[in-house]
Amino acid sequence: MSELHLRWIGVLIVSGVAAVHDARSGHIPNWIVALGLGLGAGGSIAAEAFSDAGRALLHAGGTLIGFVACGAVPLLLFRLRSLGGGDVKLLATMGALLGPTLGLELSFVAFGVAASWWLLRWLAARGAAHSRLALAFAPCLFVAALVLGVGHWRA
């Protein structure tokens, strides 16, 4: 099993736990984000530090870039009150786990899943008196992680 497989396992665990919490309560606890950072980024850096310090430093830089890259747009959406703070932290954590390239790919697919799910809910509720359809984002992220994780697992 490669290091990338271990990262995808971490993404699936963290996004799955976050999805359950978000669907039930509408919130993503900070301990889930800490778990993601500890499991994925911290574990990978620690494992590589024992074998090659240069590679561990490079991985730490990729982790930081992934965290910032995958948290930037969600932070803007949070400031516009279109996304929750827990979702911002969760997406940034996914970037830290996967790095900037795969993290942004996961974010893009998750927003696509969320938009599709929101549209289906809106179409179903057109006749109802709902003016705003709030959406739990973490379950959409988990669905995206499942789809991409299976695709990248085979590659």
Image: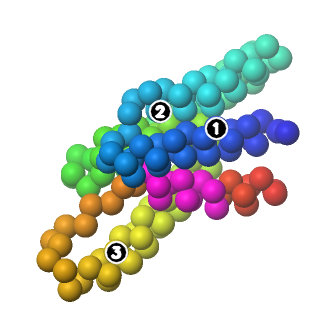
Q: Earlier in the sequence, mark 1 or mark 2?
A: 1
Residue type indicated by callout 3: Arg
Residue 121's tag is 3
Indicate the secondary structure of the residue bearing disc 3.
helix
Its colouring scheme is rainbow
In the image, which is nearer the foreground, mark 3 or mark 1? 3
Q: Residue at x 85, y 39 (%)?
A: 1
Q: Image check: 9 left or right of 119?
A: right
For disc 1, the marked residue is 10
Task: Report how far apart the C-alphas of labels 3 and 1 lie in the structure.
Answer: 30 Å
**Can residue 68 be seen here?**
yes
Q: Is residue 117 magenta?
A: no
Q: Image check: 73 left or right of 11?
A: left
Q: Earlier in the sequence, mark 3 or mark 1?
A: 1
For disc 2, the marked residue is 32
Residue 94: percent from left, percent from top: 54, 42
Residue 63: percent from left, percent from top: 58, 32
**Can residue 69 be seen here?**
no
Task: Report how far apart the C-alphas of labels 2 and 3 lie in the structure.
Answer: 27 Å
Q: Which residues are magenta?
A: 138-147
Residue type indicated by callout 1: Gly
Indicate the secondary structure of the residue bearing disc 1.
helix
